[in-house]
Each structure stands twice: as structure tokens, then as C-alpha cells.
Image (cartoon, rainbow, N blue to C red):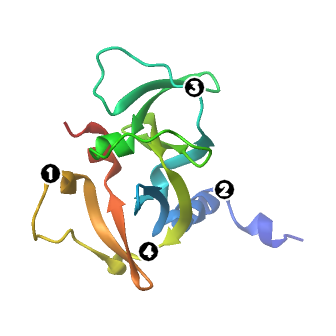
Amino acid sequence: MLDEHDFFSTEFEDEDDEDTQKDKYLSFFVGSEEYAVAIRHVIEVIGMQKITPVPEMPDHVKGVINLRGQVIPVTDVRTRFGLEVKVYTERTCIVVVMVRDSLVGLVVDSVSDVLDIPQERIDPVPRVNQREGNRYIEGMGKVADDVKIILDVQRLLFDE
């Protein structure tokens, strides 16, 4: 006799896994503001570790780390946004994301939560007072009575 597990193929399980990531966002703090990135980009969150500087890189690229034998570039989101440099604390962490088939680490002040933000609860960036930093924003997610700034990870990392 077949049980429930035998009924579902691996193909369906993979589709279900992909479905579980739909509308999910990892939120984190940079300064006093809470941002979010689509969970489909997030590989893992790790504590701070030694970052090896690389010469002639932009200021926001702090260097590289060795994560289980793989060299990964690390970008400080605070510096990328032009905020004042802050000493890393025990809450500072690296969010490892996959973008353009590459792993990149994002240094953030602290990780907050995994949020469920359906597409219909995401508004475009307001057109008022468009600033340079807005180019990294994908949308504004409404969560309860709050608004989370959803970042476009690809632009954050590769838009010069």
C-alpha cells in the first residue's frame, strides 16, 4: 500500500519548496531603518568573521571572506547607503545572497525577521523627491501598520 509520501514525486516537492518562498522576505536593520530582501536570494545568515581587504575596490566592498572553502565578496550595506561607518557589534551579521549566479555577503546591523508580504501589499517607490539611494529600492511592503523598504539586491550589488 502506498502512503502519502509515495504519492508525491520529487518534482512536486521542489515546486512546493519554491512556492513556500513566494512572498517571503528577510528583514534586517541598517541604522534605524528596517529593510527587506526577497528570501529567494538568501542563502544563509552568518555571524561576522574576518574580512580580508582587497585593494582598489569601492568603499562599500569591504573585502572577501572564506565561507567553507568558497571566497565570497562582502559589501557593507551601511557604507553602500552613504551612512556613517559604525563599529561592528555582536548583532552585526552577514546575509549571504545569490545574485547573478554569484554568492555575495551583505553586512547588516542586525537581522530582524522573515516576513510574509503578498505582492498586492507591495507599492512602488513614491515619486516624491526621488534621490540617488532610491535606485536600490524595489518597492514598499505594507506589514500591519508598518512599511518595510524592499531592496533590489541586484541593483544594490551591481549598479554603479
- The answer to whether marks 2 and 1 mark residues whose Cβ atoms lie closer than 8 Å is no
To which quarter of the image does residue 125 belong? bottom left
Return the residue at label 3.
50
- Report how far apart the C-alphas of labels 2 and 3 lie in the structure: 39 Å
Marks 2 and 1: which is nearer the front? 1
Amino acid on which the number 1 mark rests in the picture: Glu
Looking at marks 2 and 3 on the same chain, the residue that comes earlier in the sequence is marked by 2
Query: Dot 3, how many residues are within 10 Å of its Cα: few (below 14), some (14-19), or many (20+)?
Result: few
Q: Who's the residue at 22% across and 71% down the image? A: 124
Query: Dot 4, how many residues are within 10 Å of its Cα: few (below 14), some (14-19), or many (20+)?
Result: some
Quadrant, the N terminus: bottom right
Q: Is mark 2 on a helix, strand or loop?
A: helix
Marks 4 and 3: which is nearer the front? 3
Q: Who's the residue at 65% across and 26% down the image? A: 68
Amino acid on which the number 3 mark rests in the picture: Lys
Return the residue at label 4.
117
Q: Nearer the viewer, residue 122 or 76?
A: 76
Marks 2 and 3: which is nearer the front? 3
Looking at marks 4 and 1 on the same chain, the residue that comes earlier in the sequence is marked by 4
- The answer to whether marks 4 and 3 mark residues whose Cβ atoms lie closer than 8 Å is no
Quadrant, the C terminus: top left
The correct choice, above or below, for 62 with respect to 85 in the image is above
Looking at marks 1 and 3 on the same chain, the residue that comes earlier in the sequence is marked by 3
- The answer to whether marks 2 and 4 mark residues whose Cβ atoms lie closer than 8 Å is no
- Report how far apart the C-alphas of labels 2 and 1 lie in the structure: 45 Å
Residue 82 falls left or right of residue 131 = right
Looking at marks 4 and 3 on the same chain, the residue that comes earlier in the sequence is marked by 3
- Report how far apart the C-alphas of labels 4 and 1 lie in the structure: 25 Å
Q: Is mark 3 on a helix, strand or loop?
A: loop
